Image (cartoon, rainbow, N blue to C red):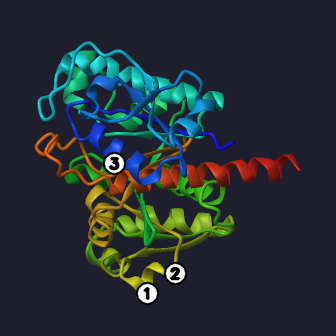
């Protein structure tokens, strides 16, 4: 029997409920997942099957959306977030993690949340979704990867002002980011000998110090040390020549130095189908690469492509990780 993916509902006033239903209609029992939330928040007319045991999910998914029910404080109006529902949103994430860590679920996939709603309604004390998952797992450093069939890219720094990036780019941060990425490529993506391309921070990768020295003083020495350890590393490379089709064929993942350097290429290549993956957790976590989209929630405009891709990627990663564990035992 295939273990299902645990899908947390996200903010019930956002597009999460409707894209979850669209994903179930697209995937059915081919890729079983259980939606964790309050069934009152699903679109009217959604066929649901309340499940208590995840062993029942695959059969239930043939005819209805399997739901692991959590009672929220209030009903939900699409586009109008309600802070009273914040504790339920948090509880759904926590339940998904428990299921994945116990082995009942193969992976966690999360629908988008609103940090402001969580702060206002649940006294949420984490910078974001990813950091909360890391805290639940008791994990230190985690890494965000954006993935689509044509590109996997990891920003070394994420949601920080651009002016702060040079000061945050320490050798330790960069090395840890590369090592976590490499380990995930092997365990979760089935890449036996990963090739990793690393961007410079400055235009033209600093042009030998003429346009900045971070490549000479920070990035280059880290890459040299990793190459000496046997890692297959390219760089530091000029970011403006790293992401065309021929360049992408020379590596399995790219490391960018800051948020937009990573996200602009993947959103250009596959705006609808990109997936957010958290690397470095003891369980698999994916998410659609978009937010709550309160402005279009409930209007029939939401695109489930990214969620479907996130569920497929989560299931594939779980299968590959399980094979790695079996080989280790053998």
Q: CA distance from mark 2 to mark 1?
A: 7 Å
Q: Nearer the viewer, residue 54 or 131?
A: 54
User: In the drawing, does residue 131 fall left or right of residue 227?
Assistant: left
Q: Residue at x 29, y 32 (%)?
A: 42
Question: Where in the figure is residue 70, as x and y percent of width and height?
Answer: 40, 18
Q: CA distance from mark 2 to mark 3?
A: 36 Å
Q: Residue at x 33, y 74 (%)?
A: 239
Q: Quadrant of the N terminus?
A: top right
Q: Residue at x 42, y 21 (%)?
A: 69
| Circle nearer the N terminus (1, 3) | 3
Q: Residue at x 61, y 68 (%)?
A: 194
| Circle nearer the N terminus (2, 3) | 3
Q: Nearer the viewer, residue 316 or 166?
A: 316
The secondary element bearing badge 3 is classed as: helix
Near mark 3 (Cα within 10 A), the count class, few <14, some 14-19 or many ≥20, is some
- Give the quarter of the image for residue 209: bottom left
In this rendering, does residue 191 appear at all? yes
The residue indicated by pointer 1 is: 246
User: In the drawing, does residue 132 fall left or right of residue 45?
Assistant: right
Near mark 1 (Cα within 10 A), the count class, few <14, some 14-19 or many ≥20, is few
The residue indicated by pointer 2 is: 250
Question: Where in the figure is residue 79, as x and y percent of width and height?
Answer: 12, 35
**Residue 81 versus residue 112 in the image, above or below:** above
């Amino acid at each position: 029997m295939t273990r299902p993916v645990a899908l947390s509902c996200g903010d019930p006033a956002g597009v999460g409920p409707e894209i979850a239903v669209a994903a179930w209609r697209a995937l059915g029992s081919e890729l079983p997942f259980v939606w964790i939330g309050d069934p009152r928040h699903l679109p009217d007319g959604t066929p649901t099957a309340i499940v208590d045991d995840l062993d029942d999910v695959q059969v239930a998914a043939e005819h209805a959306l399997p739901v692991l029910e959590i009672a929220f404080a209030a009903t939900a109006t699409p586009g109008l977030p309600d802070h009273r529902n914040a504790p339920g949103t948090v509880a759904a994430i926590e339940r998904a993690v428990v299921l994945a860590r116990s082995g009942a679920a193969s992976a966690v996939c999360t629908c988008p949340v609103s940090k402001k709603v969580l702060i206002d309604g649940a006294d949420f004390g984490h910078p974001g979704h990813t950091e909360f998952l890391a805290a639940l797992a008791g994990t230190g450093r985690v890494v965000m990867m954006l993935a689509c069939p044509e590109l996997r890219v990891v920003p070394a720094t994420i949601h920080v002002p651009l002016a702060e990036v040079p000061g945050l780019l320490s050798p330790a941060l960069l090395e840890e980011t590369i090592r976590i990425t490499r380990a995930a490529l092997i365990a979760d993506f089935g890449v036996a000998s990963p090739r990793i391309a690393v961007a410079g921070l400055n235009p033209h990768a600093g042009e030998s110090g003429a346009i900045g020295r971070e490549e000479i003083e920070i990035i280059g020495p880290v890459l040299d040390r990793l190459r000496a350890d046997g890692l297959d590393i390219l760089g530091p490379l000029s970011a403006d020549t790293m992401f065309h089709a021929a360049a992408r064929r020379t590596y399995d993942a790219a490391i960018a130095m800051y948020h937009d350097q990573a996200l602009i290429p993947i959103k250009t290549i596959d705006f609808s189908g990109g997936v957010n993956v958290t690397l470095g957790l003891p369980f698999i976590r994916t998410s659609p690469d978009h937010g709550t989209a309160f402005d279009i929630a409930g209007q029939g405009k939401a695109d489930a492509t990214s969620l479907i891709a996130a569920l497929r990627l989560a299931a594939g990663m779980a299968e590959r990780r399980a094979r790695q564990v079996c080989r280790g035992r053998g």
